[in-house]
Every structure is written in C-alpha cells, then in structure tokens.
Amino acid sequence: MSTPAPRRDRAPGERRGDEPLPPLLVGTRRWYLAGLIALALVRAGASVLAAALAGRLVGAAGTGAPVQGLLAAAAAAVVAVGASVFAERLVAEQLGQDYIHELRVKLVRSTLDSDRSRSAGVTIARSTNDLTAVRNWVAQGIAPLVAGIPLVVVTVVWLSLTSVWLGAAVGLPLLLLVAVLLLLSRPAFERARTVRRARGRLAAQVADTVHAREAVRFAGGSAREARRVDRAGQRVVEAALSRARITGVLRSASMVAPIAASIGVGLLASSGRVDAATASSALMLAGVVGAQSTEQGRVVEYRQNFRAARRIIAPVLSEAGPSATGAGAARRGLGGPGTGQSAPSGSAGASGQAVELTRRPADGGGDAEPLLEAVPGETVRLVGGDVQVDAVFHELAGLAPGRAACRVAGVDLAAAGPRERRRLVGYASSGMPLERGSILRAVRYRLPDADDDEARAALAAAGADPEAWERTLPQGLRTLLRNGGQPLTPGQRAQVHLARAVLGTPPLLLLNRIDADLDAAGRRALRALVRGYPGIVVLASNGSDGTGGAGEAAPAGEGPQGDGPEPGARVVVVPD
C-alpha cells in the first residue's frame, strides 16, 4: 500500500485541457446582457437616424426649407447615441465585475481546499493578471461585439437599400477585416499563452526568492537571484513583444478598414453614383462603424487573452474541495455511511468518540483497509517518512477523501461540513504561517464563536503566558499579525497553533511535529497537555517520546523524560 506523493505545482498554461469556466449568464447577469443588447439596438437605430437626418440637412442646404425640426430630431438622436454608449459602459463593467468577483472567490477557495501545493506568486498571478484578462473579455470584449454587430448589420443593410454601391463600398472592407481577424486569432492565442506562462514563472520566481530572503542574504546570493529574476523577466519581455506584433496587425487592420470604407464612399460621390446628401449620410455612418470596427481588433485580442487565461484558471476551479467530494468518497466505500464498517471496540462511552481511519488500496481495487483505530484517552505516535506521515495527517483531518476516510465520533469527516469538521478535529504543525489578523482571532480561528476568555485559557494550556503577552506585545493579544505571524517568535506562533488546536477540546487532536518550534518549557507544557488530554491524540515528532522530550532533564516531581514513548502510547508505523 503506497501513499501518492504530492504533485508539484505546474506553471501556468501547462494543462492541456480546455475546461469551461463557471457559467456567465446566470442570475442578474442575464439581465445585464439583455440590457446590453437593448442598448446596442438603441445605439444602432439612433446612429442610422442621425446619419439620415444629416443627409437631409445637407440636401436642404440652399433650398430655404425650414430645418428646425430636423435639427431637433438630429440632436435627440445624438443624445440617444451618447446616453446609450454611457449606459453600455456601465452595464458592461457591472457584468464583468460581478463575474470576476465570483471567480476570484472560487479561485481562492479552490486554492485553499486543494491538496496541491501552489506557489504564492502563481496564485497572485492567477488572481490578478488572469482574472483581468477574463474581465477585459467580459466587459470590453463581449459588450463591443453585442453592440457592434447590430450597428454594422443595420448600417450595411440601410446603405445597401439606399445604394448597392454604397453597401459594397462599406461592406467589402469590413468583410476583409473579418477575414484578417479570423486568420490571426490562432496566432494571437498562442502568443497570449506564451506570455502568461512566462509571467507565471516570473511571479513564482519572485515570490520564492522573497520568501527565502534571509537564506539568500546569508549565503551571499543576492546578485545571483537578481540575475535569475532578470532572465525570467527578459523572457516575459520577449514574449510580450512577440504578442505585440500580432496585436499590432489586428489593431492596424481594424483602423484601416473604416478609412478604406470612407475613401470608397468619397469615390462614389466624386463619380456621381450617389448625390452629396446620401454621401454625407454614408460618410457619417462610416465614421460610426469605423469607431466600432476599431474596437473589434481589441476584441480579438481580449478574446485570445481570455482563452489563454481560461486554460490556467478553469482546471484550478474544477478541482473539487473536500466538501464537494465527501459524498463521492463515501459512495466509493472508504468508510462512509452505509459501508458496513463499524467503529473500533472499546467502552460504551469511548466507542462513541472513537477514531477510525481507512485507506483505499493503491491499485483502486478491493475494500478499504483499516490503517488506524483509537479510543479517547489514547495517544498514537506516527512513525515513518515525512511525506507519508504528512499524508496520514491530511487523511485524519478529512482532507484527502479520494484516498482515505476518517470517522470521528461516528462522523465521516469527508462528508461533514467545515463547521462540524472544525468541532471534531484540532490540528497544529510546525512551520505553519498564521493568517492576517489579531492574536485572539488566530486562536479562535477554528471556533470563531469562542470568547476571549476561552482563547486565553487555550493559550495557557499551550504553555503561553497570556498576561505576559499582554504586557510585552505592542497591542497585547490584539496585536495584528502580518507576514505569516510577525511579530511573534516561532515558538509563540507554535503556541498559537497549539492553542487553536485544543480550543474546545476536540475529540481528535493532531500534532504534526509541533514540538520542533517549541523551547524546553514549551515542550514540557506540550507533554503535560498530551498526558492529560481526554480525547485522542495522534502525533509525530523528531523526539524519542513524540513530544520533544529526548535528552531533557526531568522537571521536579516528574519521572525521567526522553527514555521512550509516552506511557500507554501506541506507535503506528506508516507504510511507504
């Protein structure tokens, strides 16, 4: 039986799938799109009306006919065009921001719930650059398409009905523009993917370098790391320039097409095929369509950037978290409800709070195999390779439903909700950063409804001195933690994690080498906590007794320390 090793984090764009993003047109966003379509039709109609009125004004020149009515109607049409463009921009931005807000929350949630370890730089790049590409397509790509297609169609149809020559003069350059956009869309997509991969690697390089700042400085490697970042940045520059060549052609073609249409209208007017009034209307419409066609070059660019970003974001969003996969794990026979697996034996009271961990065979066949069983008051020490032991801790916490199932007090953790899982399991590990917020919030993070007195009591149980912290820290226990737990020392951060884990006395307490960050006094407090804990303790440690007691002198009133496992503790060897 083997435990899969954690997969490495891939650079952006390495996934070949083209999974869809969450649906865009749901809820109020459907109404936003309907509003965009309505506004586009209003703008198209008002533009054609304004052009027709301009032609009539030109035709009325020198005739002495009253033009006040024409002027009023033309002014109203201009106001309608301006108001519709203004409203389009607002509605399009609302549509884009609403969608991006949903994706951003899901992206962060997926990253937090995933079993995969991801670089902070890659995550930041996804939540900024890639989501910006999605927003640009939704707000500045879909909207011009929705607004531009009715305008172009209505314009070409109206000009064709007025004169076939006018329809051809304006329509042919637009058709050539469409052909160029379609021809260059694929190269634009490939260049956009290349840029995103290079940016992702650069972001990961910068984040990892900054994270290792102290090690780099003491090893005298600042210049070397700067050169590595320079090389990664140069690849971004080269990829961006390569993409700019394609986007430059797209934008130049979209700019040239309306100019060619205007020249065609001028040639028709000079040859006498259309009169001056009709030519004036056609030129005005060509200008309106020209502004819209200029946006189409950017639309293709936004579309291909969106497709490249989707290749990166969609696979991350499609990774189901524990809460989404718990039911499926139970159905696969991993110890979920109805699988016929009973709780471990013990006293009547103990069996109700017992822990049972079962694991699916590596080959995917056969029944789930029991890996660990324990009852309240029992301490279990895990022994094995670091990767294998860490995997068991994930399984005990219900965070790996695809390969194992853990039942605590009769509850399948994989099928339980986050609130129930927090109530049943406390976890503390060495080296874990702390969330941004106050110290009291960090202690109560697992049980947000706990009060300040309970948080202080948990800190005391973890070996901390809350009163001393109140005196020595800048704002006492309400000091804001930043950058993973500053200004606390590593030992104090470990005590905060330990206090969080024991808050509320969960039935299952998981301690993953937490003693590594504690000093001698902290390890003595940890040892006392483990010995007196009423629930089940599963721990791993580099020390011989599982609580960091190796080689320490025994405090007064206690027996020898570090001579072996805790009395009554059971050693479980984790298989490779």
Image: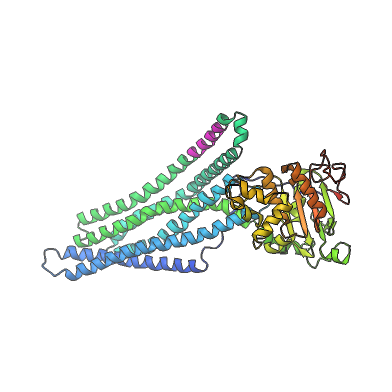
The C terminus: image quadrant: top right
Total numbered badges shown on the rendered structure: 0
Q: Is residue 181 left or right of residue 477?
A: left
Where's residue 475, x and y in %? 58, 50
Seen at 51% across and 50% down, the residue is 128
Colouring method of the image: rainbow
Q: Residue at x 47, y 41 (%)?
A: 240
| Picture residue at 64% right of the left edge, 48% below the top | 469
Q: At which x and y percent is residue 402?
A: 73, 57
Image position of 73 (left or right of 559): left
Taken as a whole, is the magenta stretch helix, strand or loop? Answer: helix
Decide whether residue 226 is among the magenta residues: yes
**Residue 42 position by quadrant:** bottom left
- The percent coordinates of residue 411 (x first, y second) are 77, 64
Image: 518 above or below 426: above
Give the magenta part as a residue range: 225-238
Horizontal side of residue 87 vs 263, given as left or right: right
Q: Is residue 440 visible?
A: yes
Residue 242, percent across and down? 47, 40
Q: Decide which of 534, 336 is in the foreground and name it.
A: 534
Which one is nearer the viewer's eye here, 45 or 216? 216
- Indicate yes or no whether the magenta region holds residue 256: no
Residue 403 visible from this viewpoint:
no
Q: Residue at x 54, y 32 (%)?
A: 226
Instruction: Give residue 228's quadrant in the image.
Output: top right
